[in-house]
C-alpha cells in the first residue's frame, strides 16, 4: 500500500438562512451526522477531528439519520433519492436505494425496530411516504398537508404514532402501522419547522417560525402546554432536541440564542446567547448523552456549556464553502495548513490535531485564488476582490496588515527572496517589492495564468493559456523578458520550481506534466503522462525527487522525477470533486483539498 489516508479534516454543515439544519445523532452516542454538498459527514462527538465522509450521492444531500440499531444510515438528497448504507465498514456499502417522491427530501424518521422509514419533503404530488426499509412497500399514507412538509418523527415505542410539520402552518398526527392520518394541529401561526417525540414516547413537541413551542401527549396528540407561554423565543425556532431522559428540551432559534426548557414545569433552565451578528442565528441542535450541540448560520458547531451559558465549551470551525487553495508553513515548531475558500475565508489548521480557526479581523471579501508564505513568515494571498494581502502568521489578524489594491483581478501569486512578489492578473503581470507596486507589464501579448519565482530569486516563470511558459528576470524594480519560450503540451494550468531550484515542473490542460532542467538552459528533462483530464495543480515534495499533481479526473499522482513510470496513484482522493490544491507537510505527507470543503492528509511511501 504505497499511500494511506492519515487525517480527514471535515467541512462544516452547509446552512442557509431561514432553513433549519438537521443534525443526526448516533444511537450508540459516539458520533453525529450532518450534510454539506453531496457529502454526508460523520464526526466523533467527543473528538470532532475524527471524521468520515460518505460521498455516494449524485446530488446535494439534505438530511441523514442513523437507524436506531446503529448499523445503517439513511440519507436523502434534493432529487428525492434515499440511500440506506452500512456504517460498520469503511466502504459504506449501499444496502437499499429508494425514490419515495420526486423532489427534495427534508427529513427522515425510523421506527425503533429499524424496519420502517418515513420520508417527507417537497414532492410534486405528495409530500411524504412511509415504507418498509427492506422492500420499499408502503406501510401507510402521509396526507393532510397541502404544502411542503419540513419535519417528521415517529414515536420510539408502541403503539406507534407519527407526527409531521409543514409550511401550511400545521402539524399532523398519525396512528399506525399502517400509518393513517388522524387529525391536523393548527396551533401555530407560521411554518412548522420541527416536530420531535420524546425518547420515552410520552410527549411530542412542535417548533415554529412564530417563535412558539407546543407540547402534546405522545399517545393521543392532545395539547399539554406551550413552552414559555405565548413566546418561547423572540425569533423563529428552527430545531428542537429532547434530552435522553425526556424531561428537558433544547431549542435553537433565529433570535441568536439556544435555550434549555424543563418541560414538566414549563420553565427556561438556561439561555445560551450565541452572539449579535446575523451569522449567530441558530439553525440546528442536538442533545446526545451529555453533549449539547447547536449550529450557527456561520456553519460553526457550538458545544454548549450548561454551567456557563454565555460561553460555549468549544466551537468547531472550518469551511462550509468550497476550498480553492492551500499552503503549509512551520510556525513555532508546528506544521500548519492554511486553506482559502470560495467565500474569502482563510483558516489555519494544526496538522497534527486538526484544531483550526479563522484569522481575526476583516479579510478578503471574495474567493481566495492563491496563497503562499514569504520569507518573513507572512501569508501572501490574492483574491477575486482585486487585492493581495500580507498577513503575519504569528498574529493571524488582518487588521493593520498590508493590503495592495490592484487594477485588475489577480489569479495567481508567487514570492521570492528580497521582499519580491509577482502577481499574475487578467492580462497583466505585476511586480511588488516590500508590499508596494513597482512594475507592471500591461499587455504581455498573451493571457498569463500562473507564476512561479525561482528560489534563487532572479528568475520568474509565467505560464500562459497559449501553452508556453515565458521567463523573466527581476532586475531591481523591473521585470525583463528573457525572450525564452518553454513549450508545454497545452494551456498551462500550474508551474512550480523544485525547492532546490534545479527543476521547473509545468502542468497543462492536455493532461501532461513537463519537467524542465534549469541548469541545462531549461531543456526538457522528462514528460509525465497518466492523468485522464486537465491537470489543475502541482506541488514538489521537500525531497526534490518527487512531485504530486491533481487533475479534473479526481486523481492525484505522486511522480518520481527520475522515472516517470514509478508513480503513486491516489484514486478518488475527494470523490465526486477534483482536487483544487496540494501541498507537502514533509517528504511523506501530502495534503489535498477540494470543492467538498474538506482537507485530507495522506501518508505516501515509495
Image: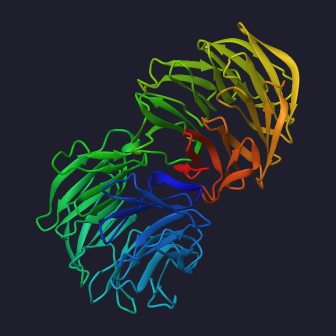
Identified at 46% across, 77% down, the residue is 119
Can you name the residue that lies furthest to the top here? Answer: 476
Give the quadrant of residue 285: bottom left
Left/right of residue 291 with respect to residue 84 in the rendered view:
left
Residue 168 x/y as whole percent: 43, 70
Determine whether 37 is above or below 118 in the image. above
Q: Nearer the viewer, residue 172 or 472?
A: 472
Give the quadrant of residue 232: bottom left
Q: Nearer the viewer, residue 479 or 215?
A: 479
Q: Nearer the viewer, residue 581 or 588?
A: 588
Q: Can residue 62 be seen in the rendering of this structure? A: yes
Q: Nearer the viewer, residue 439 or 143?
A: 439
Identified at 86% across, 36% down, the residue is 467
Q: Can residue 597 be seen in the rendering of this structure? A: no
Residue 473 x/y as whole percent: 77, 15
Residue 98 x/y as whole percent: 56, 80
> Can you say which quadrant of the picture contains the N terminus?
bottom right
Determine whether 542 is above or below 501 in the image. below
Residue 178 x/y as whole percent: 40, 93
Left/right of residue 141 with respect to residue 388 in the rendered view:
left
Identified at 85% across, 42% down, the residue is 490
Amino acid at each position: 500500500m504505497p499511500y494511506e489516508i492519515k487525517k480527514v479534516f471535515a467541512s462544516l454543515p452547509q446552512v442557509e438562512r431561514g432553513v433549519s439544519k438537521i443534525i443526526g445523532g448516533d444511537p450508540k452516542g459516539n458520533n453525529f451526522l450532518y450534510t454539506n454538498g453531496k457529502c454526508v459527514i460523520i464526526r466523533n462527538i467527543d473528538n470532532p477531528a475524527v471524521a468520515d465522509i460518505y460521498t455516494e450521492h449524485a446530488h446535494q444531500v439534505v438530511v441523514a439519520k442513523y437507524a436506531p440499531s446503529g448499523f445503517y444510515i439513511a440519507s436523502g438528497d434534493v432529487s428525492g433519492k434515499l440511500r440506506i448504507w452500512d456504517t460498520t465498514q469503511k466502504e459504506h456499502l449501499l444496502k437499499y436505494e429508494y425514490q419515495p417522491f420526486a423532489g427534495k427530501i427534508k427529513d427522515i424518521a425510523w421506527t425503533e425496530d429499524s424496519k420502517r422509514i418515513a420520508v417527507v419533503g417537497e414532492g410534486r404530488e405528495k409530500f411524504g411516504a412511509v415504507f418498509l426499509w427492506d422492500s420499499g412497500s408502503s406501510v401507510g399514507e402521509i396526507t393532510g398537508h397541502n404544502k411542503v412538509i419540513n419535519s417528521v418523527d415517529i414515536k420510539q415505542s408502541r403503539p406507534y404514532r407519527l407526527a409531521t410539520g409543514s409550511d401550511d402552518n400545521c402539524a399532523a398526527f398519525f396512528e399506525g402501522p399502517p400509518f393513517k392520518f388522524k387529525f391536523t394541529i393548527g396551533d401555530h401561526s407560521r411554518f412548522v419547522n420541527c416536530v420531535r417525540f420524546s425518547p420515552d414516547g410520552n410527549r411530542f413537541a412542535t417548533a415554529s417560525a412564530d417563535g412558539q413551542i407546543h407540547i402534546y401527549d405522545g399517545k393521543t396528540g392532545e395539547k399539554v402546554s406551550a413552552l414559555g407561554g405565548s413566546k418561547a423565543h423572540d425569533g423563529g425556532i428552527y430545531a428542537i432536541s429532547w434530552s435522553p431522559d425526556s424531561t428537558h428540551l433544547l431549542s435553537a432559534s433565529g433570535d441568536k440564542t439556544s435555550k434549555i426548557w424543563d418541560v414538566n414545569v414549563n420553565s427556561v433552565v438556561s439561555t445560551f446567547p450565541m452572539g449579535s451578528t446575523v451569522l449567530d442565528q441558530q439553525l440546528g441542535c442536538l442533545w446526545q448523552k451529555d453533549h449539547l450541540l447547536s449550529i450557527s448560520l456561520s456553519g460553526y458547531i457550538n458545544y454548549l456549556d450548561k454551567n456557563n451559558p454565555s460561553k460555549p465549551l468549544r466551537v468547531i470551525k472550518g469551511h462550509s464553502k468550497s476550498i480553492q487553495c492551500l499552503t503549509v508553513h512551520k510556525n513555532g515548531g508546528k506544521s500548519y495548513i492554511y486553506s482559502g475558500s470560495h467565500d474569502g475565508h482563510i483558516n489555519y489548521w494544526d496538522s497534527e490535531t486538526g484544531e483550526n480557526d479563522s484569522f481575526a479581523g476583516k479579510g478578503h471579501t471574495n474567493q481566495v485564488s492563491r496563497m503562499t508564505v514569504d520569507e518573513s513568515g507572512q501569508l501572501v494571498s490574492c483574491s477575486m476582490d482585486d487585492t493581495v494581502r500580507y498577513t503575519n502568521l504569528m498574529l493571524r489578524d488582518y487588521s493593520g496588515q498590508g493590503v495592495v489594491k490592484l487594477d485588475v483581478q489577480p489569479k495567481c501569486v508567487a514570492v521570492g527572496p528580497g521582499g519580491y512578489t509577482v502577481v499574475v492578473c487578467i492580462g497583466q503581470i505585476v511586480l511588488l517589492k516590500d508590499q508596494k507596486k513597482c512594475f507592471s507589464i500591461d499587455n504581455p501579448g498573451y493571457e498569463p495564468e500562473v507564476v512561479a519565482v525561482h528560489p534563487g530569486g532572479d528568475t520568474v516563470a509565467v505560464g500562459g493559456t497559449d501553452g508556453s511558459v515565458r521567463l523573466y528576470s527581476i532586475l531591481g524594480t523591473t521585470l525583463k523578458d528573457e525572450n525564452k519560450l518553454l513549450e508545454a503540451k497545452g494551456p498551462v494550468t500550474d508551474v512550480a520550481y523544485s525547492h532546490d531550484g534545479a527543476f521547473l515542473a509545468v502542468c497543462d490542460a492536455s493532461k501532461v506534466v513537463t519537467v524542465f532542467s534549469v541548469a541545462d538552459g531549461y531543456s526538457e528533462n522528462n514528460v509525465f503522462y497518466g492523468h485522464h483530464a486537465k491537470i489543475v495543480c502541482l506541488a514538489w515534495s521537500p525531497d526534490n525527487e518527487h512531485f504530486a499533481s491533481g487533475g479534473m479526473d479526481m486523481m492525484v499522482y505522486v511522480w518520481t522525477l527520475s522515472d516517470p513510470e514509478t508513480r503513486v496513484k491516489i484514486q478518488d482522493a475527494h470523490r465526486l470533486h477534483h482536487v483544487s490544491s496540494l501541498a507537502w507537510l514533509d517528504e511523506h505527507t501530502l495534503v489535498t483539498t477540494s470543492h467538498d470543503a474538506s482537507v485530507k492528509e495522506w501518508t505516501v511511501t515509495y
